[in-house]
Image (tube, grey):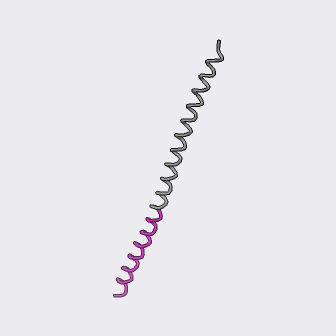
Amino acid sequence: MLWPMFAIALGFLGLAVLTVLAVRVFVEVRRLSGQVAEAGRRIADASGDLERAASDLARAGRNVRP
């Protein structure tokens, strides 16, 4: 009777450990997705700035040519 109870206790402990690890993974994935979203916004902003700078440069180049 002792061994089955010991096996059940170890099984429950294993599930508890897996649950804790799953929660930690979930929290880290949420944090990473927030960082990826922020990086995407920053890249989009930088792309817009680059596009505006390129159009300004193209206009300035047209004015220089005879």
Q: Quadrant of the C terminus?
A: top right
Q: Is residue 53 above or below residue 31?
A: above
Q: Nearer the viewer, residue 58 or 20?
A: 58
Determine the residue positioned at 56% across, 39% down: 46
50 relative position to 30: left or right: right
Q: 51 and 15: which one is in front?
A: 51
Q: Quadrant of the N terminus?
A: bottom left
Residue 17, image x, y percentages: 44, 72
- The answer to whether residue 21 is magenta is yes
Specify the segment rendered in magenta: 1-25
In the picture, measured across the screen, residue 37 lies left or right of residue 62, that is: left
Query: Which percent across, then down, holds residue 49?
Result: 57, 35
In this view, 21 is above or below 31: below
Instruction: Pick out the residue farthest to the bottom.
Output: 1
Residue at 44 percent of width and 65 percent of height: 23
> What residue do we see at 37% from left, 87% from top?
2
Identify which residue, 39 or 17, lies in the foreground: 39
Badge count: 0
In percent of width and height, residue 6 lies at 39, 83
Q: Residue 47: say if magenta.
A: no
Please name the predominant secondary structure of the magenta segment in the image: helix
Residue 50's x, y, as percent?
58, 33
Residue in the picture at 59% in, 22% down: 59
